[in-house]
Image (cartoon, rainbow, N blue to C red):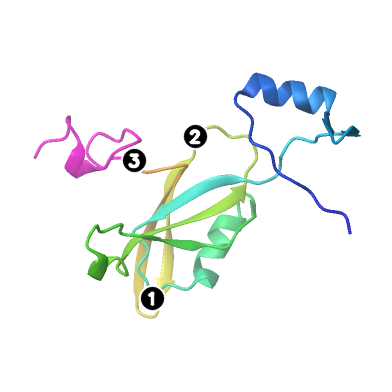
Amino acid sequence: TYGKAVFFLKSEAATHRVVKQGISIGGTYVPVEPLTGLGTKVVLSNVPPFLGDHLLRPHLEAPGVIKSPISLIPLECRDPTLRHILSFCCQVLVLLPDCGDVEGSFEVSYEDTSCKIFYSLEGVCCYGCREPGHIRKNCQLAPA
């Protein structure tokens, strides 16, 4: 059967070189293709655990193609007895057209209520200063 292998190289320059030249394994030339089409990680927040994926999918499929299952993000408690607790966040890989930074929200109806779901690319944004990479309780700029 035909299989593929994934290689992680030290630098982007090395990756470009190997894609252009190929590699030799055991004296046999092997062409290398770039890893493409995986999608961009979209992080959804304020997602109650009772909302099914079937309610989120239409909003994610509108701008692109879903490339992975929608997976819940654990709360990451250090206490082993609390590690089963989930955050109200989930993530999914979506193949999006090149549209720069994407963030926003959409509404999902469930039974007699409406849930506002927020989305952003690649990671967590602070609700205090709106900067990526940290959350509000660790923010130096947001008021206490």
Q: Which amino acid does the dot numbered 1 rest on?
A: Phe
Residue holding disc 1: 50
Residue holding disc 3: 125
Identity of the residue drawn at 60% across and 58% down:
68
Residue holding disc 2: 101
Looking at marks 2 and 1 on the same chain, the residue that comes earlier in the sequence is marked by: 1
Q: From the viewer's perspective, is 72 left or right of 39?
A: left
131 drawn magenta: yes
Q: Quadrant of residue 125?
A: top left
Looking at marks 1 and 3 on the same chain, the residue that comes earlier in the sequence is marked by: 1
Q: Nearer the viewer, residue 95 or 84?
A: 84
**SS for tag 2?**
loop
How many residues crowd mark 2 within 10 Å: few (<14), some (14–19), many (20+)?
A: few
The quadrant of the rendering that contains the N terminus is bottom right
**SS for tag 1?**
loop
How many residues crowd mark 3 within 10 Å: few (<14), some (14–19), many (20+)?
A: some
Q: Quadrant of residue 15?
A: top right
Identity of the residue drawn at 25% across and 59% down:
77
Looking at this view, name the residue that lies furthest to the front: 26
Q: From the viewer's perspective, is 27 left or right of 100?
A: right
**SS for tag 3?**
loop
Q: Which residues are magenta?
A: 125-144
How many residues crowd mark 1 within 10 Å: few (<14), some (14–19), many (20+)?
A: few
Identity of the residue drawn at 36% across and 68% down:
114
Alpha-carbon span between mark 2 and mark 1: 29 Å
CB atoms of marks 3 and 2 within 8 Å: no
Q: From the viewer's perspective, is 45 left or right of 55?
A: left
Question: In the picture shown, does residue 58 fall above or below 22?
Answer: below
32 drawn magenta: no
Q: Which amino acid does the dot numbered 2 rest on?
A: Asp
Image spot of residue 14 (x, y percent):
68, 22
Identity of the residue drawn at 86% across and 34% down:
31
